[in-house]
Amino acid sequence: MTHILSAATVVAAVVGPAHAEGTAPGQGLSLELNGAQPSDKGCRLTFVVANNLGADLSKAAFEIALFNDAGVVDRLTVLDFKDLPAGKTKVTRFDLAGTDCAKLGRVLINSATECVGAGVEPATCLRSLKTATKTGIAFGL
């Protein structure tokens, strides 16, 4: 079952673009799982995303698979990061209803469901994606 979530909170970016290790400015899209905290609804995931593609994205969304601590897929869901201006870093939070952060073992980027921007091919978001995590949860492609 696939769910679509909107960003609960978007905070304007920090000083200068943040990017995953090995991603030079002007290259790619970086997505960092920065935090996972229990919330009233379930588990709140915080992401830091930096658009270093050299082009604005009017919409970027990714289907993710959530694995429990036993390594079994718990569910698939879509995270909608909305617009990502070129050269901009932003923080976005998603509340995952019914998800226990303590039992979340892995978050896998399954696909890019939307990648829309002037001069940007739809496959660009996934092909150029660099991932990192600051949590104890495995995160990546």
Image: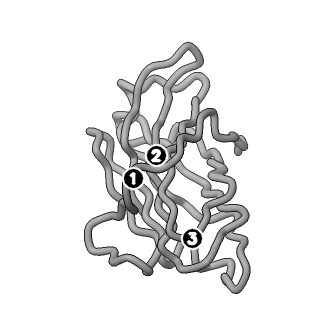
Q: Mark 3: give few (<14), some (14-19) or many (20+) Cα within 10 Å.
A: some
Q: Which mark is residue 78?
A: none
To which residue does mark 3 refer? 86
Quadrant housing the C terminus? bottom left
Determine the CA span between mark 1 and mark 3.
Answer: 17 Å
Which of the 4 quarters of the picture holds residue 3?
top right
Label 3 near label 1: C-beta < 8 Å?
Answer: no
Q: Which mark sits nearer the N-terminus, 1 or 3?
A: 1
Amino acid of disc 1: Glu
Q: Nearer the viewer, residue 118 or 60?
A: 118
- Colour theme: one colour
Residue 120, percent from left and from top: 66, 82
Residue 65, percent from left and from top: 53, 49
Q: Residue furthest top?
A: 40
> Which residue is depicted at the point 35% across and 38% down?
105
To which residue does mark 2 refer? 47
Label 2 near label 1: C-beta < 8 Å?
Answer: yes
Q: Is residue 108 left or right of residue 82?
A: left
Which of the 4 quarters of the picture holds residue 1?
top right
Q: Secondary structure at mark 1?
A: strand
Nearest to viewer (mark 2 / mark 3): 3
Q: Is residue 67 left or right of residue 122?
A: left
Residue 122, percent from left and from top: 68, 78
Q: Is residue 49 above or below residue 33?
A: below
To which residue does mark 1 refer? 32
Determine the CA span between mark 2 and mark 3.
Answer: 17 Å
Nearest to viewer (mark 1 / mark 3): 3
